[in-house]
Amino acid sequence: MRFSQICFSFIFIGLPLCSSAQTVSVNKAGTDGAFQTISDALNSFIGDVNPSPNVINVTDGGIYDEAITILAPVTLQAVGTSATLALEDNANGTGGRGGIFINLPSELTTGSVVIRNFAIIPATATKNNEPLTAIENFNNNLFLELDQCILAPNDGNNLPLVTDGYTNRVLELISTQASYNPAIVQFADDGIVLGKTDSGQQEGAGVELLFLNSVLSHFRYDYNAPSPKPVEYGISMPNAYGTTPPYADVFRRTSIVGNSAVSFCQDGINVCGDLETITTGSKILLRGHARNAIEFNGPSPNFRNLDNLLIVGTSGQGIWDDGYGPVRAYLTNSIIFSVVRNLWYVGKPANDVASGTMHVENCTLVPARTTVNTSHAYRLEVGTQTNIDIRDSILCGKSSQPTNNYDVFSCPGINDVSLQGTAIVTTGIFALRAAPFSLGTSATVSGSYITDDPQFVDSSENDCLLPDFLDVQNPAYASANSIGGPLGGGADYVGVSSEVKAWEMY
């Protein structure tokens, strides 16, 4: 159960009820008593602390070029057709140039804000002074849901610079981010930043994000861009703001659900607290990040339930964990392919030991790309006490580096690795070295694995968006999982469909 559900069970106790929730309409013409701007509709709710959200229905599919400030619970939705929020500089936001700024009344334990069926882009008027952040809040009594939204740069014509892909099996995104282009108006700092406080105090019951059937893309950090540089984080749930002490782990939760993508940013998802990904019939796409696809930080134990992820084409780590607190990580039914540095890295902070267990099940993990010698394929830092339970998965290495001393699963701490029904590729162009584990004196490996020689054929990073990406066709894997069934890793098992004993990426 999400903590927001728990909070809502008692949110009404001791809370003064104001007027009942209102439902209003917005269209550009102002017909039938509708407001002509979203800001005017929001201003009509000021002072309303009713925990039941007010509703704004945008009915004309128009382009609303304005600064958006939300000060009361609300459901803001385009009905009948999608609409566009072209965000102007908002004086309430970071540096006086935010986008959508949320600051709910402190009387609310947790308030709900839903934004549904919008393209969220910076306004063309901000071309030379882009808003810093698309969506941010300055307190911690918020449950924010984004449903069927696209957050992206403005292509110069008030259209988002991505294709509308959230209804597809695998999201279709423009594959590359060009260097800074003055014709494209970008958000200049972050996509979504939640969990800041304006008072430096832990307010309310916490903050939660539900990112549902939505796309955040092409906010990639460009080192050659003029100041201010483009976005740093796609989604950030920081552990502190300013000098505020870090909060408890239950204080923040990020959920990425459905046909969603967070792609082409410096860092994709940066969170303190809990993170979960949930989808069926597809994979949540994290693609093309300049540093890390996922970064965990914060000094308290986090729950990380990562399911049905496709992480591809990252210039840093696939998953970076700062190593604070006991790890409770579950990576299941996922594919990580083509990262420059470590596929999964766990660090050791000065005052912590990164204890706990990482569970990996039914995954295909392939760093694939050549990299500097100081980056292992997989790395737990010296002094960590993290254990790893790997089952029914396929582990590979870097491109054409099977003899590289760093092309290994490095466990120099007090680490126990348990293997069941797993294949470790030790030959071929995407192999770990022949001795795939580099162990410290206190680390152990138990269980068995097979070392067959699948090949990657006719593959490129762009192929990863095709439905049959990484389907397994190696007959040797037909009964190789932990219960004697087919080993498919993060893809469906295809079986013997040709005479080529290949593990194919089409």
Image (cartoon, rainbow, N blue to C red):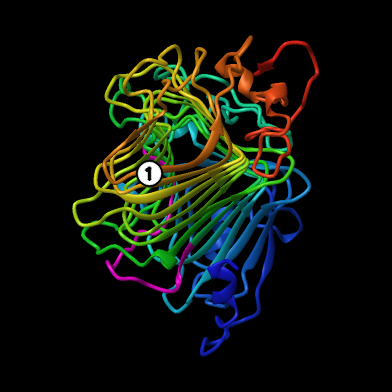
* Residue located at (63% from left, 34% from top): 489
Instruction: Evaluate whether residue 177 shows in this view.
Output: yes
**What are the residue bounds of the magenta stretch?**
189-207
Residue 267 highlighted magenta (yes or no): no
Which residue reaches farthest bottom? 14
Query: Where residue 503 sits: x, y (%)?
Result: 65, 20
| Residue 270 placement, left or right of 310 | left
Q: What is the quadrant of residue 435 in the picture?
A: top left
Query: Where residue 264 sits: x, y (%)?
Result: 48, 29
Please tell me whether residue 362 is drawn above or below residue 54 in the rendered image. Answer: above
Q: What is the quadrant of residue 11 in the picture?
A: bottom right
Quadrant containing the C terminus is top right
Query: Where residue 483 sits: x, y (%)?
Result: 69, 44
SS at badge 1: strand
Instruction: Evaluate whether residue 65 shows in this view.
Output: no
Residue labelled with disc 1: 444
| Residue 92 placement, left or right of 135 | left
Task: Report the magenta stretch's main SS.
Answer: loop
Q: Nearer the viewer, residue 342 or 144?
A: 342
Residue 204 highlighted magenta (yes or no): yes
Please tell me whether residue 63 is drawn above or below residue 349 in the rendered image. Answer: above
Query: Where residue 196 sits: x, y (%)?
Result: 35, 59
Please tell me whether residue 83 is drawn above or below residue 299 in the rendered image. Answer: above
Q: Nearer the viewer, residue 363 or 252?
A: 363
* Residue located at (33% from left, 44% from top): 443
Tell how many labels. 1
Quadrant containing the N terminus is bottom right
* Residue located at (63% from left, 35% from top): 490
Which residue reaches farthest left? 350
* Residue located at (57% from left, 25% from top): 157
Residue type, mark 1 in image = Thr
